[in-house]
Amino acid sequence: MIDASLKKVAIGHFNISDIAALYAIFDSARELNLPVIIGVSEGEREFLGVKQTASLVRSLREEYDYPIFINADHTYSLDGIKKAVEAGFDSVIFDGAKLSLEDNIIKTKEAVKIARSINPDILVEAEIGYIGTSSKILDAIPEGALIDEKSLPTAETAKKFVLETGVDLLAPAVGNIHGMMRNAKEPALHINRIVEISGATGLPLVLHGGSGTSDEDFVSAISAGIRIVHINTEIRVAWRNGMELGLESDKNEISPYKLLAFSKTAIKEVVIKRLKLFNGLK
């Protein structure tokens, strides 16, 4: 994280639901010699197994001596935080974005206390400002999502939140949304707000809901202080497109690993493109 801040680049955070996505992301990062974060939401963790996912990512890190990390994405309960830290996750996110500011502060502070009582070195992230919850194709902006400048968290709010909670990373709403618009342009990011919050908090900032964001907004946001970018919906779309291609290419194929190879290839294309952009590579 310190290295990313010094270089003014962002670490790619990509969510997985199966091993094909994991290897696609890992192989992409190794090809470019870049660190990478694997994210698993509560639903993804429930499907894959909390301990199993953490162990699998750690095994890759240890076997290849490579900077691949595992993050417990969007955790809404303190019990979920506890289970993820105990399982060996490198970082956890407590998501209290739908709560009032004061309730979010109270709950996040508890999450930090619980996490660090188990692992003092754990990185704890929190969110301020609601941006929706689903990584899917959207027909409309998520109800209640804060995208206009007047409704976004201010630098003062962010500073208060950070000082009272003691988090290591902050994910503010800056015009971003979870999911991707089906037939409309993604909302533009408010770059000046990123600059203000970065200056006020002094923390690495995280951009959630990165899927569908324009390259120009990504570059500007990273320059302004974003140090981790989350991509999930783009991964899911690539997975499905690859699977459909595999099924169409051989209607008699029934070997899952052969079909999943198509998804892996499609995901790699997305991940390599995004990692290059986040790190200023051609």
Image (cartoon, rainbow, N blue to C red):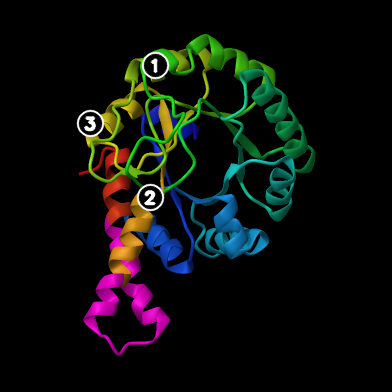
Residue 49 lies, with reference to residue 94, above or below; the image says below
Q: Is residue 142 left or right of residue 31?
A: right
Alpha carbons under labels 1 and 3: distance apart: 16 Å
Magenta-drawn stretch contains 16: no
- Marks 1 and 3 close (CB-CB < 8 Å): no
Residue 193, numbered label = 1
Type of amino acid under label 1? Arg
Q: Quadrant of residue 244?
A: bottom left
Q: Which residues are magenta?
A: 244-269
Q: Earlier in the sequence, mark 1 or mark 2?
A: 1
- Marks 3 and 2 close (CB-CB < 8 Å): no
Q: Is 166 or 262 nearer to us in this picture?
A: 262
Name the spot of residue 32 as percent of width and height, x first. Answer: 32, 52
| Mark 1 residue crowding within 10 angstroms, few (<14) / some (14–19) / many (20+) | many
Type of amino acid under label 3? Glu
Residue 38 lies, with reference to residue 133, above or below; the image says below
Is residue 47 visible in the rendered structure shown here?
Answer: yes
Q: Is 123 or 138 nearer to us in this picture?
A: 138
- The residue pinned by badge 3 equals 216
Give the SS element for disc 2.
Answer: helix
Residue 233, numbered label = 2
Give the SS element for disc 3.
Answer: helix
Residue 272, numbered label = none
